[in-house]
Image (spheres, coloured by chain):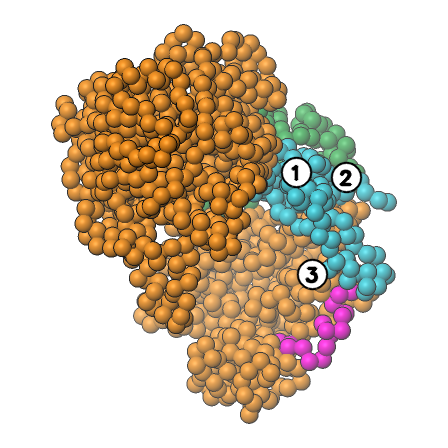
Chain colours: A cyan, B orange, C green
Amino acid sequence: MRIVCPFCGERELGEFTYLGDAKPKRPAADAGEDAVYDYVYLRDNVAGPMTEHWYHGGGCRAWLKVTRNTLTHEISAVEPAAGAGAAKVGA
Amino acid sequence: MRGDQANRLNNGGLIDRSLPLSFRFDGKTFSGFKGDTLASALVANGVKLVGRSFKYHRPRGILTAGSEEPNALVELRSGARREANTKATTVELYEGLEAASQNRWPSLHFDVMSVNQLFAPIFVAGFYYKTFMWPAKFWEAIYEPAIRRAAGLGRAAQVSDPDHYDKAWAHCDVVIAGSGPAGLAAALAAARCGARVILCEEDFVLGGRLLADGGMIDGLPAAEWVARAVAELTAMPDVRIMTRTTLFGVYDGGTYGAIERVNDHLPVPPEHQVRQRLWRIVAKRCVVAAGAIERPIVFAGNDTPGVMMASAMRSYINRYAATPARRIALFTNNEDGWRTAETAIAAGLQVAAVIDARPDVSAAHRSLASKGGFPVLHGAVAGIDGGKGGVRKISVSLAGGARAEVEANGLAVSGGWNPAVGLTSYHRGRPKWRDDIAAFVPDGAPPGMVAAGAANGAFGLGACLCEGFEAGAAAARDAGRSGNIGSMPVADDEAFSITPLWHVAGKGKAFVDQQHDVTASDVELAQREGFQSVEHLKRYTTLGMATDQGKTSNVAGLAIMAAVSGKSIPETGTTIYRPPYVPVAIGAFAGHHRDENFHAARLTPSHHWAAEQGAVFVDTGLWKRAQWYPRAGEKDWLESVTREVKAVRSGVGFCDVSTLGKIDVHGPDAGAFLDRVYINAFSSLAVGKARYGLMLREDGIVYDDGTTSRLAEDHYFLTTTTAKAGLVMQHLEFCRQVLFPELDVQLTSVSDQWAQFSIAGPKTRDLLKEIVDPVEDLSNEGFPFMGAREVKLRGGLKARLFRISFSGEMAFEISVPARYGEAMARNLMIAGKPFGVTPYGTEALGVMRIEKGHVAGPELNGTTTAGDLGLGKMMSTKKDFIGRVMAGREALVAPNRQVVVGIKPTDKARRLRSGAHIIPKGETPGPDNDQGYVTSVCFSPVLDQWIGLGLVERGRERIGEIVRAHDPLRGEDYDVELCNSVFYDPDGGRQRG
Amino acid sequence: MAEFSWDVRSPLDRALIAGSYGAQGDAGVSLTEIRNFDLVQVMARRGKAGEMAKAAQARVGMAAPETPKAVDTADATLIWSGPEQFLVLSKGGRHSIEALGSVFAGSALLSDQSHARALISISGDKARTMLAKLSSIDLHPDVFGVGAAAATSMDHTSVTLWRGKDLADGQAVFNLLVFATFAESLWHTILDSAAEYGVTVGHSEELA
């Protein structure tokens, strides 16, 4: 598999590390145990396009959001994590 | 020189008669020529019997002339280079080649195990499953070894392969598999467009079937056209022609696997060269021009030596000028097979008869028969009279029901052609059936790939050239290349008509899969027993599961299954195709990564100095770390380690701790960031101070620990454990980029920038005063415990000094830029000489941390909470941090959790072992009474006995209790006392002094 | 008072022995270790990439690369190392971390990497062929031209690779920064990979 890093260009799979589903968002500090439990443990078993976190640790060290079809491995989109590089985020 | 090559034709062939080669097969010396394969040289020498079959030990000859060969498997070379199951049909002949037949004992001509044939009625499909069921204990001791001796292929070398292999990457616009007419035309079109082209050909000569079948292209004889095409391609800078290279697999994203047999055609690779190279080819487009494989017809005795594929016979006669027989019969169900009769006549051989399964033959062939003086028999081969000496007589069942007999010493068979649909089907593609050619053809392909020519079911030469040329041009266009592609090569198309015939019913064994000895009746039996799905058929009979992966047998097998189950062939379907297309040596996948190069090694800055001291090194992850420094006269590691510990506790010692992960955390929000990743607060840490920190995973379990120092308002220096350095960096980047992108903080690994040494023992300050510039105040007031700051060394070099202690002694860690690391080790030895300075390794480090009750890897084992480690109080209640919520779950704060506690045997002479289970006194060992286990042990020089740490249920409430350490693995059971985990200096006075 | 010497030792000090290795004849690969350089990692602060770029321009007279490139200035090379970050490679303290601290104050965060890497310069007829055994990226001259850079991996080890100026005879030069503690291991892998082409090995104090 090859992933087009938005910073480095197309690279082979070996430069990347897979983390998993990018959909769950870390709950706010006061969200309570149930919300955190869902965040930590509950995952959809997607058959089709899925947004995933991948780390370009063998390259530019950017965390990426990769949209990959779990049935075909086709990658339809790759975007950097919100805080990759020095991007200005939030306040 | 002709030697004894009795079956070598006087003229023709692509062999170099000026370069004779001698070789040995089964100990006998033969001769051949440069350009031969082992198979063609054996053919030239009249060798018909080349092996014994897998299960029945039946005599077998050469069936094909390519990588689809099921029978002619040999052990090539000898000694450490012996390679089993090598196809004689793909082995290039070289001077001195040595090969031996397989699976026979004591010899190929007299094989004791051939009595298996007499028991053939019981050796049916599923025989082993049904027979060797009981008694169960007999399987390993008796049945399996006996079966393995009797059935099987060649012998592995059993010793390390002396040759080298490597791996490489290649990139191109268009990769082409196969250099026959379609492949060469594709390469020409793509290359003329300016595309970067890689042309892979598994043979050692380019041309594919043109080498054997000739023909006219663009008005030129095929060989001449090939030479011109190759010359044109070779002249282009971005075309790479790779012979002896098989494209064996396709992977996601346009990555292809190829194996290049760089030096397999030589007895031994030249110095500094590899035997084989594994290529990962990244291509925008791929044209599969891998051709087609002629398929046999299944009939009784079809495995007799001398029965050969019709196209293979043409290869031997035309390409190698070696004839498998002088009097040949042909059995075909299609037009193409007749070319072998034409070839035989042209070569001056006798044609005994053509047996054609079709109701009619063309007028041209009828006149060929009459000119050649041989009969055309409409019918099918019903049996062979022959044995290990080869075909003698062929029994024919004629269309009208009568019988005929043909005397011949070779039988060419053509059952039609199967396009090589492997590559196009490797992403779970299923080929589709085409009635007109009675064959499966690709139905789509992985992204970027297209089949052309015979691989796509186009069997005519003109069609192959046309499809290849158009596919090459389209591939280049798709890759963004354009140019003047010139004119398409043209040739006439031969007619191709076929009447499918898979199996001639009759008496006697008729083989579908010759390599695995699967017969037509095995397929029928599988059907009767309910194994009708092709996937079940494959596994029950082992059809197509041998090293040839059923290249000549799969389609026939499923066609027979279709017939007996009353279904059509497309309804019956094919099994899943999987790479590799040909067997690939494990050595090629490993490449450089074997023995000491199995993985990269990381060396500490003082590595070479430590090696000079005679250090014993231990692999910790990728690192080589000094484990201890033996001295003359010490009888074992324990004596050395004990000496090192005592030296530190009574004087001073040092240890390279550069392997700890080191990360610069900098930016205005660095403190806030650390507050979120550690359970304890770091924003409140004063500049110039260090603090121990603990990280959790989001599920509340401990992830990593280490000390982090604040060097400036916006700059922290974080350390991780050696084991987790890379993972913690990845985790922190995840926190920074994904979880908390609003924080203005950056992370940089400085693990390799700093050489860091721990200096420990009551005389540490004395030693440091020699190294550090006198202006620096190292007193308890000037540099208190947990202080951290930059200092100047004597001579002006700047270093970082941290007053932290893992050993429990008065200690500092000192960091210098890594290129000074070795000098630092040497200077510590010089400066410490008056104080008896002692370098110590990871073992002594471990002893001292256990004596101090510090947790490490065995306790931070992915199951423990901060509370379990006795560090629960560190958890801040004033801030959110990773793992906070989940750490509060009921089960993670339950009072009966297994927690860290000290453990020592009641018998001071007893050795404590890690892994021993803790069982209450008087209880029976078992899961119900298992209260934990010993995690870390050492011999404590201070206590003069073995001590350890363990995870024990309610351990901290049970200090002083005597329990059992039960160690079923080592057969030990002894009493131990649960005690405070801090064995040494529990109030910490020494490290603060 | 004991006498100390603070000798610097490159991470390849022991492994590198100048001379010829591998196949006889004209060496296809030439390996030169560049020793004792200053290397500073410059990473923009949040939202300050523009200011960092201006500061770099003011300091060295060249724009810092915003894409995988390496640019040569009069006395330094700026090598892209990731989004909104680059490395400053120089000699003799001209652009050491001490010298650059004030330049990027407020716009970027600096980390000294001078001792964290070994620098190997690779050239020769077979340099590209040899590198294809180690590098998964496409080094074809049309794709990886002079000044191209990549943060990538070789032999599972993170490296920074860039193409320097061609030699006078037109040969391409590939510069490789590898983490110091991995350097000896990768060096042996490089030597093994190059042996079939013949290798000459040396070291230099000068940046190419």
Task: Identify the secondary structure beneath mark 1.
Answer: loop
Question: Mark 2 Cα within 10 Å, few/some/many (few <14, many 20+)?
Answer: many
Q: Nearer the viewer, residue B63 or C140?
A: B63
| Amino acid carrying mark 2 in the image | Ala
Circle 3 residue: B697
**Which residue lies most toward the bottom here?**
B922
The crowd level at tag 1 (other Cα within 10 Å; few <14, some 14-19, many 20+) is some
Answer with left or right where residue C101 lies relative to residue C94: right
State the CA–CA distance, disc 1 to disc 3. Answer: 31 Å
Depicted B752 relative to depicted B232: above or below: below
* Residue positioned 59% across, 89% down in the render: B961
User: Foreground: B675 or B688?
Assistant: B675
The answer to whether residue B597 of the structure is visible from this angle is no
Q: Is residue B660 magenta?
A: no
Q: What element does badge 2 sit on?
A: loop
Disc 2 to disc 1, how far (Cα)? 28 Å
Choose mark 3 or mark 2, whichever is in front: 3
Amino acid, disc 3: Arg
The answer to whether mark 1 and mark 3 are in CB contact below 8 A is: no
Query: Where residue B829 sits: x, y (%)?
Result: 44, 59
Percent from the top left, x then y, of residue B25? 20, 40
Which mark lies nearer to you, 1 or 3? 1
Which segment is the magenta one?
B884-901
Residue located at (77% from left, 37% from top):
C48
Q: Amino acid at mark 1?
A: Glu
Residue highlighted by disc 1:
A74
Going by the image, does B32 lie left or right of B907?
left
> Which labelled disc corresponds to residue B345?
none
